[in-house]
């Protein structure tokens, strides 16, 4: 069974804090993705990675960075959290770009 | 730039009814189209993936079709059940990126 896990289901942080969201997949997938989901705006791609140490910007990379030191782990970093980064964050992975994406359970982040 | 639209935004049906959810996309240079289910506060569960060379895929009571020339995909749910109540999202992959529609909120009432 495919499995994508995220480090936290719920997270509350203060404005200005550095925030790390972790994602791990156990399927040996090449590609990993970070999305955020907001009411009325749908799902938007923040960053993706097609290999270890490789990354590409998505549609809304501002205010975020990522790290992929190992194939199975993809981290999203909010360098200085702001209230407009309050959102649901979803991680996904796929074997290749033409293949199915599998999603984790999501992290609901609240920045106060 | 790929744009994906889902109609209707919400649908309420009685149990047992067959129903169709619609998804349209603007760029026919699509690698694949994927249908997902999302329960409130949860992640996305992949239901069906149709490659660009395919016309349809079936899984149990679900059937998804893809017509690249018209830029449309449909998800057919047979004999709907209250447990099918969820938000259904479609997403098209083109140029390496998966673009989502806004989703259809489905309610199946007993």
Image: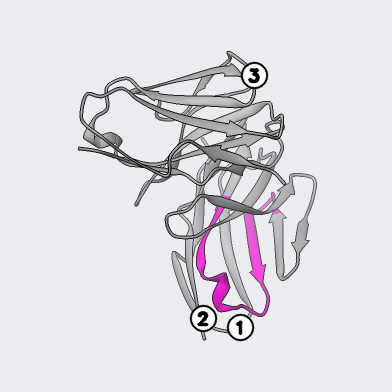
Give the left or right position of residue A57, taking residue A29 as reference: left
Location of residue B94 by image quarter: top right
**How far apart are the two marked residues, 2 and 3, measured between alpha carbons?**
44 Å
Query: Please, what secondary structure does the residue beneath circle 3 have?
Result: loop
Total numbered badges shown on the rendered structure? 3
Residue at the farthest front position = A7
Mark closer to the observer (2, 3): 3
Q: Position of residue B101 (x, y in %)?
A: 50, 51
**Residue underneath mark 3:** A51
**Which residue range is magenta in the image?**
B67-90
Q: Position of residue B24 (x, y in %)?
A: 57, 54
Residue at (76, 58) in percent of width and height: B57
**Residue underneath mark 2:** B13
Location of residue B59 by image quarter: bottom right
- In the picture shown, does residue A82 fall above or below A8? above
- In the picture shown, does residue B7 fall above or below A109? below
Find out whether residue B89 is within the magenta segment.
yes
A30 vs A11, nearest the viewer: A11
The chain ID associated with circle 2 is: B
């Amino acid at each position: 069974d495919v499995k994508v896990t995220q480090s936290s289901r719920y997270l509350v942080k203060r404005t200005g804090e550095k925030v790390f969201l972790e994602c791990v997949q156990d399927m040996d997938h090449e590609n990993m993705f970070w999305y955020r989901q907001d009411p009325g705006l749908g799902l938007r791609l923040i960053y993706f990675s097609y290999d270890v140490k490789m990354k590409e910007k998505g549609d809304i990379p501002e205010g975020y960075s990522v790290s992929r030191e190992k194939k199975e782990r993809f981290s999203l970093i909010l360098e200085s959290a702001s209230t407009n980064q309050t959102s649901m964050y979803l991680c996904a992975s796929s074997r290749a770009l033409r293949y199915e994406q599998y999603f984790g359970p999501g992290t609901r982040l609240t920045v106060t | 730039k790929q744009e994906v639209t889902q109609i209707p935004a919400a649908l309420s049906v009685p149990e047992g009814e067959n129903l169709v959810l619609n998804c349209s996309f603007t760029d026919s240079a699509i690698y694949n189209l994927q249908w997902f289910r999302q329960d409130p506060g949860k992640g996305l569960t992949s239901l069906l993936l149709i490659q660009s060379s395919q016309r349809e895929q079936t899984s149990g009571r679900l059937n998804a079709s893809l017509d690249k020339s018209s830029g449309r995909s449909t998800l057919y749910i047979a004999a709907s059940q209250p447990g099918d109540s969820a938000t259904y999202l479609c997403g098209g992959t083109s140029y390496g990126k998966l673009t989502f529609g806004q989703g259809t909120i489905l309610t199946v009432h007993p």
